[in-house]
Amino acid sequence: MIRKIDCFLACASPCDLEHTVGQLRGSRTVQHINYLVADADNSDCAPDDCGVIVIDRMTSTQTILSIAEKAVSDYVMLSLKPQPVNIGQSALERVVRVAADANAALMYSDHYTIENGTRCAHPVIDYQLGSLRDDFDFGALLLIKTELLKKYAAQIGHRNYQYAGLYDLRLFLSREGTIFHLNEYTYTVEETDLRASGEKQFDYVNPANRDVQIEMEHAVTAHLGMIGALISHVDCRTPDFGEQDFPVEASVVIPVRNRATTIADAVKSALGQKTTFPYNVIVVDNHSDDGTSEILASLASQTSTLSLPQSGVQEPSLIIINPTRTDLGIGGCWNAGVNHPKCGKFAVQLDSDDVYSDENTLAKMVAAFYEQNCSMVVGTYMLTDINMQMIPPGVIDHKEWTPENGRNNALRINGLGAPRAFYTPMLREINVPNTSYGEDYALGLAFSRHYQIGRVYDVVYYCRRWEDNSDHALDINKTNANNLYKDRIRTWELQARVELNKNK
């Protein structure tokens, strides 16, 4: 039995897709071809044997409903980009066969991209329970089981999403069946977004996309409720800040390896804070060999001591930890700093290539713990170049975090902001994952399961972007590995929240 496909192709003009349509006509599995255009005037060159659907945007609920109404075959193939797609040899027949064998609700595949005239492999990652990012990379082609598409369209009480319609459909399909990754290269498409990974990663928090983010939050919140993972903002624990004694009120923790260019700026920024309470700076030097260690030693020799409030004993303001272990990532360095006996009640983050925006950052972060009764605080940062001049998208305030729904929406976004600060006893209990990516996000989800996360909306941190940033320009395999790990973090957290709700 040959299963059939109805194809729906995003395009600026049907004339642009002549090659793609020619390939589709040559496939015995393609039954109907439809163009998706934003302007009816651009449909003049559409062939007589192809349909034309005028849409507002690819991501809207109305577009999804229009496709569902038109679809009659076993599967819908949705082409998301207006660029021509070069279909691989017998790829459509293969895709449909595997989709049927796997009983996939939605299927996507690896593919090739043309980047500056060169064909590049573009593998994608497996979908899982925690793949809730609205920017999950499916590629340009989706194969959707028509029966489920129509079931989605038949639901009563649809929200009329402008931006989250396709996202809402995807979440629905994940509840109804399997979202399947075919790890075969089935097509080639031109890649038009050639920005470095260090730029792309901030798209989800670009203030210009705020309306988009609000819709995405509505969709994921409804989804969490349907799978039993939604948690209430009124069901929060309150930390007891008097449960233990600490040598100082706060510690700025700076993990570092080979940041000779920037480490002095970071340390001086931390030491220059004005507070009404005693604090220290703990730098964990992870076997630097580029001169960083020597810079730290020089700074330590020039730094004054502080008098501990209880004993009056003079202690160094700058503490340098040199771990003996050689297997520590950023998270492992954090554990070394937080578990040091001189660590304060609150541990406040500062990356080795960033700086605090002014001398009041630490005071504001600590005050937020007491004012908001929270176990973790996240600040607001501004993206800058190495010289601390603002670069797009500028201020990242993570206003998608709200006291009412931030703990749920945190499962959709790919980060929580900076700087991050933690109530030390809880951080010592949870421990930081010994990784160099995603460790802060894992902590945020774990803390938010039971506690509110406080927010400081003043710009308190400069996040400096430069060519030596660890995420400045990652290749596709490293980007995939990072995204796969964060999806797994979300999966584990979702499972924990489902169990939490079951046991209430």
Image: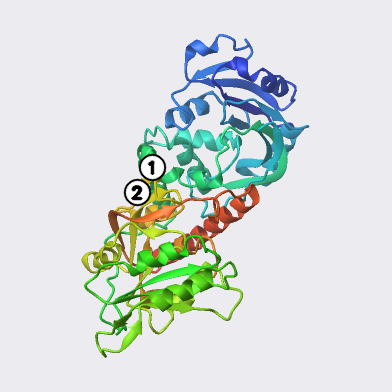
Residue at screen point 42% across, 54% down: 463
Q: What residue type is labelled 1?
A: Gln
Q: CA–CA distance between discs 1 and 2?
A: 7 Å
**Contact (Cβ within 8 Å) of mark 1 with mark 2:** yes
Relative side of 492 to 422, left or right = right
Q: What residue type is labelled 2?
A: Glu
Image quarter for residue 137? top right
- Sequence-first tag of 1 and 2: 1
* Residue positioned most to the right: 89
Relative side of 76 to 373, left or right = right
Task: Count residues near mark 1 (Cα–Cα under 10 Å), then give few for <14, some for 14-19, many for 20+.
Answer: many
SS assignment at label 2: loop
Residue that badge 1 annotates: 213
User: Which quadrant, please, contains the C terminus?
Assistant: bottom left
Q: Which sits in the foreground, 266 or 130?
A: 266
User: Which quadrant, please, contains the N terminus?
Assistant: top right
SS assignment at label 1: helix
Question: Residue 277: image x %, image y %?
Answer: 24, 75
Residue that badge 2 annotates: 400
Q: Which sits in the foreground, 306 or 232?
A: 306
